[in-house]
Image: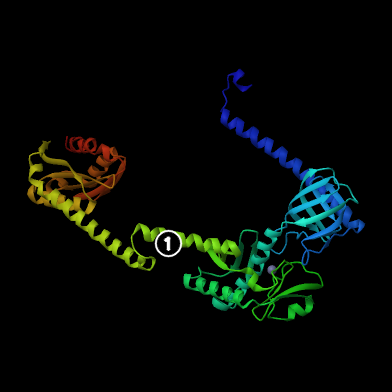
Amino acid sequence: MASEKGLGVDEDAFNELMEMQRKRARAARSTGAQNAQMDLIADLVAQGVQSEFIGYSKTVCDTEIVAVIDSRALVLKETPFYPEGGGQQGDRGELKGAGFGFEVHDTQKPADGIILHIGRVLYGTPQVGMKVMAGIDRYRRGQMRRNHTATHLLNGALRDVVDSSIKQAGSLVSGERLRFDFNYFEAIPIEQLQRIEQFVNHEIMRNTEVETCEMALADVQQDRRIQAVFDDKYGEHVRVVGIGEFSQELCGGTHVQLTGDIGSFRIVSESSVAAGVRRIEAVTGMEAVDWTAEEHELLIGLSQRLSVKPDELPGRIHLLSNQLREAEKQIKLLQSKAATSQLDSYLDQVVQVQHVPLLAVHVGELPMDALRQVLDQLRQKITSSVLVVASVNEGNACFAASVSPEWVEKGVHAGKLVGQVAAVADGGGGGKPDKAQAGGKDASKIDLALKQASAYLESVLK
Ligand SMILES: [Zn+2]
């Protein structure tokens, strides 16, 4: 429309604005839908509808639908599905009834006693009162049990190995891995991480029973051995999960029966998430075994590449890096030898510009420090002069310039000279009136850049 009036329009910007508008409209609709869901849930709470979680001991049960929030969210009378909470993700699984199937992607607890099974209808139509069989994804739950109990062990090990004042700052238990955030001011050294791994694996080997009990919140708060994040909302009675003498935590999550069920524990990363907060990520069970196998494969690959046994790798790598450093030294030495041997051949390239002897040469491949040596040696050979030398180092242009005292007095400035020259090779630099250096990104322009030297002298001395 705007172009009809001859205004012209940035079409990309226009499309972007339209897309933003569409997104806003979609977001408003979904918030509307969420509000409607929350209204329905509030009604259920008011009516006293409750779903009972029976998933600590069961993974499948016969039950019935007590509320249909919409076709994507159902409430059951009893359920083995753990709703996301205490860092542990919600269960996934399936609901099946006569002529009805539902795939559960997530389980949430939007209000006390209301457990929402979120997913999609596979066939049929959900109805209040419908009998269904509810079954969770048992493999994933198994992984989450292992990861959750391992999180408690990690919490205990951290305080034993690193610092007894460490406090949990958050956690996430999923089917794939566990994540534990805690207050600490610096990175945990690799040796301590190894000791933590050892500690946890040792507790796994001891095959200690994981016990849960209900306790009055007041008693828990007085027992200093019990770890808890008291900012969370708790009822009067709370669940305490204990692993022998090693760990006691306030927790509503699902756990293994014996620590041995965890199988194996490996830390995969330690990092910083915020100022004063560190994060450890770890894996358990088959994931930990796979992690170890991948590391082993890497080691075997490296030892084959370097033709040594795995335990000889550190020595071989040390040797190779020494050899490399020595070779680099040799290359530099040879390069500067080659450059100095050519010095005399440069002398007949000296030209007179406004009565100043000027030498501007490209000496080939040479690092900056060797280039400066070449410059010094040339200066001894042509005492009254303006000199600019250039080289290529690792694909970049290097320039160095010198101006003898009598020409400095006449206003020739090495810093300005080398700056103008380097500008042609997409670079810059500078320095004192008598001596300066510069670099440039475009080494292909060196010869062109050197031509700038006589132009500079013309402009200064005209
Ligand atoms: Zn827990």
- Does any portion of residue 276 appear in the rendered image? no
Of residues 19 and 41, the one drawn nearer to the viewer in this rendering: 41
Residue sitting at x 86%, y 54%: 42
- The x and y percentages for residue 75 are 84, 54
In front here: 290 or 154? 290
**Residue 115 seen in the figure:** yes
Q: Is residue 98 above or below residue 154?
A: above
Q: Position of residue 62 (x, y in %)?
A: 85, 58
Residue 13: image quadrant is top right
Locate the C terminus by quadrant. Answer: top left
Identify the element where label 1 is drawn. Answer: helix
Q: How many marks?
A: 1
Image spot of residue 220 (x, y percent): 75, 78
On screen, residue 255 versus residue 277, left or right, reads right
Taking the image as four quarters, which one is ligand 1 found in? bottom right
Q: Which residue is mark 1?
A: 299
Q: Quadrant of the N terminus?
A: top right
Compared across the picture, whether 362 is left or right of 110 comes to left
Give the colour scheme of this rendering: rainbow
Mark 1 Cβ inside 8 Å of ligand 1: no
Residue type at mark 1: give it: Leu
Using a 10 Å C-alpha cutoff, classify the residue at mark 1 as few (fewer than 14 neighbours), some (14 to 19) or many (20 or more).
some
Asked where in the image residue 79 lies, by quadrant, the reply is bottom right
Looking at the image, which residue is at 84% across and 48% down? 69
Which of the pair 302/280 is nearer the observer?
302
The picture places residue 199, in percent across and down from the top left corner, at: 56, 76
Which quarter of the picture shows residue 22? top right
